[in-house]
Amino acid sequence: MSQALEIQFEAIYARAPTASATVPGRVNLIGEHIDYHGGTVLPITLDKTVTVVVAPNDAPSHRIRSEGYEDESVRVVNEPASGDWSDGVMGALAKAGELGWIRGGFDVLVSGNIPGGAGVSSSAALITAVLRAARAHGKAEMDQKTLALKAREVENDYIGVPCGIMDQMAVGLAGAGEALALDTVSLETEVITIPDGWRFVTVHSGVSRKLTDGRYEARFIECKDAATALEAEYLCRAELGDIAALPDPLKARARHVITEHQRTLAAIEALKRGNAEAFGGLMIESHASYAGDFAASTPEIDALTKDAVALGALGSRLTGGGFGGCTVSLVMADKVDGWLEALLARHPKAWLV
Ligand code: GLA
């Protein structure tokens, strides 16, 4: 249990927490918006984490706080999502109640350094951490894959974001310094060690967004419509030759999804071969497709990825759900310091995650 947070919990709630959990954020190296259409994706964990400590409070409400903030969200057990930051905690507690792991109200203290609204899975990490803490509290057993599916249900059904399974699997299963090649249909995973000398650097553009703002869902619906029109069970696996008859923008969205899946499979092979140039080239193509065909980038992010490459990165792209947030760039270890300094000098609003 995180001792410092446990002490704070006791200071606030006048008793010890019964359980805790710490979960990392993730950055997706390549394979965007394909995890809800049968694709294979390639996330790694970040060294940023969220920790939650919990205890039952014998009340009909949950009391939820974030370390360092005076404000407390007091919310009736099982009340619906409200758009508040505490929704992830509420949804996860409701799920834990459904599973029989907890009963009644809980006090929850949250602490972490994963930036929110940045495309690095702060939400999946928070939900997963609360579920794990509740599982520990209830002395229950559930494997990580099943828990990831439960965490996704919280996002889909409680928060209302129709996301795929990538984030919950990545934050729940990937180890430090390892990439997780995840088949989002079979949920089979392959762990791939990042070769010596490669660095994936995550830079925040300075522009945040919320996945609940409707733009993620709009793309989800377009892809679903494209799949229906093509009679494809999984859009990723449709034939590129078949999309010509689709109307725009469905044609462009489908082209992104199909080609992004092909790029991701090629990138996994490049990573295994240790071919950084090939991997970086695929990242550059991926960004062009995400910004063009999928129309999910921003001018700041386009400029950031372009300059990242001009200054020596082998590849750079928008990562996560899109419309703002972070870029991820592949840079050789011996170049990182100078590269980063030059990039941040050109982009004063950007910062290293
Ligand atoms: C968000 C979603 C994921 C995935 C990415 C885009 O992170 O939660 O399921 O769709 O966007 O690749």
Image (cartoon, helix red, strand yellow):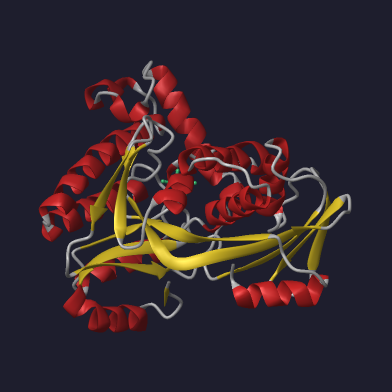
Q: What is the quadrant of residue 79 in the picture?
A: top right
The residue furthest front is 139
Q: Is residue 79 left or right of residue 124?
A: right
Q: Is residue 191 above or below residue 315?
A: above
Residue 173 in the image: state x and y as whole percent: 41, 49
Give the quarter of the figure containing the C terminus. Answer: bottom left
Q: Is residue 280 above or below residue 307?
A: above
Residue at screen point 66% across, 50% down? 134
Q: Is residue 68 visible?
A: no
Q: Is residue 20 left or right of residue 163?
A: right
Residue 34 in the image: state x and y as whole percent: 37, 38
Residue at screen point 40% across, 38% down? 35
- Front residue of 162 and 186: 186
Residue at screen point 46% across, 53% down? 171
The residue furthest top is 231
- Front residue of 24 and 223: 24
Q: Is residue 78 left or right of residue 330?
A: right
Residue 291 in the image: state x and y as whole percent: 35, 50
Residue at screen point 18% across, 64% down? 314
The residue furthest right is 59
Give the quarter of the figure containing the N terminus. Answer: bottom right
* Number of disc labels: 0
Residue 118 in the image: state x and y as whole percent: 49, 61
Q: Is residue 95 visible?
A: yes
